[in-house]
Amino acid sequence: MHEMGIVLHLAKTLDQTAEENKLTKIWRVTLQVGEVSGIMTDLFEDAWNYFRVRHPYLTEAKLEIETLPAVTWCDSCKREYETVKYGRTCPYCGSGETWLLRGNECIIKEIEAE
C-alpha cells in the first residue's frame, strides 16, 4: 500500500510549509490526483486520517481530492485522447506511438491555513 508512503511524504511537506510560512494550523488541503496515478483514494483518505492526528499542524485538516483526467498524446496523428477510455492505442488513427500526457500526477493544489 504505497498510499501510506505518499501521505507520510505529504504530511512532512505540509509540516515544513507550515513552519516556513509561520502557520499555526492547516484547515484544508486540496490534492489533485491523476486518474491513472495508481493512488486508491479511499485508502489514501484512510492513511490521511491516521497520519494527520500525529502532526500538530494537521490535526483538524480536511483533505479534498480532485481527480485529474488522464490524457494520452499520439505522435502519429498529433492528437490527444482519453487514456482510460482508449488505452495505448489511438482511437483516431490506430497507432501505438502514444504516451501519457497527464493523469499520473499527485499535486498539492491548495492549502487553507491560519
Image (cartoon, helix red, strand yellow):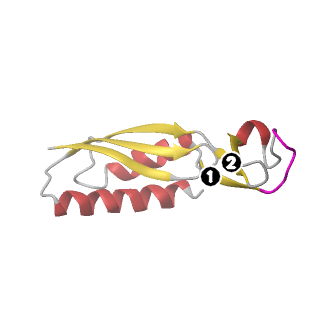
Q: Nearer the viewer, residue 98 or 33?
A: 98
Q: Residue at position x 81%, y 39% from top?
A: 92
Q: Nearer the viewer, residue 32 or 97?
A: 97
Q: Quadrant of the C terminus?
A: top left
Q: Nearer the viewer, residue 65 or 7?
A: 65
- Crowding near the residue tagged with mark 2, few <14, some 14–19, many ≥20 C-alpha atoms within 10 Å: many
Mark seen at residue 72:
2
| Range drawn in magenta | 92-97
Q: Residue at position x 41%, y 62% from top?
A: 9
Identity, as a three-letter code, of the amino acid under mark 1: Leu
Q: Is residue 93 magenta?
A: yes
Residue ID for mark 1: 101
- The image position of residue 107, as x and y in percent, is 44, 51
Q: Main secondary structure of the magenta part?
A: loop
- The disc, 2 or 1, on the residue closer to the chain's N-terminal end is 2
Q: Quadrant of residue 96?
A: bottom right
Q: Quadrant of residue 87?
A: top right
Q: Quadrant of the N terminus?
A: bottom right
Q: Secondary structure at mark 1?
A: strand
Q: Is residue 42 magenta?
A: no
- Position of residue 22 relative to residue 34, above or below, is below
Q: Residue at position x 48%, y 58% from top?
A: 6
Q: How many marks?
A: 2
Are circles 2 and 1 on residues that touch, CB within 8 Å?
yes
- The image position of residue 82, as x and y in percent, is 69, 38
- Gap between marks 2 and 1 measured at Cα: 5 Å
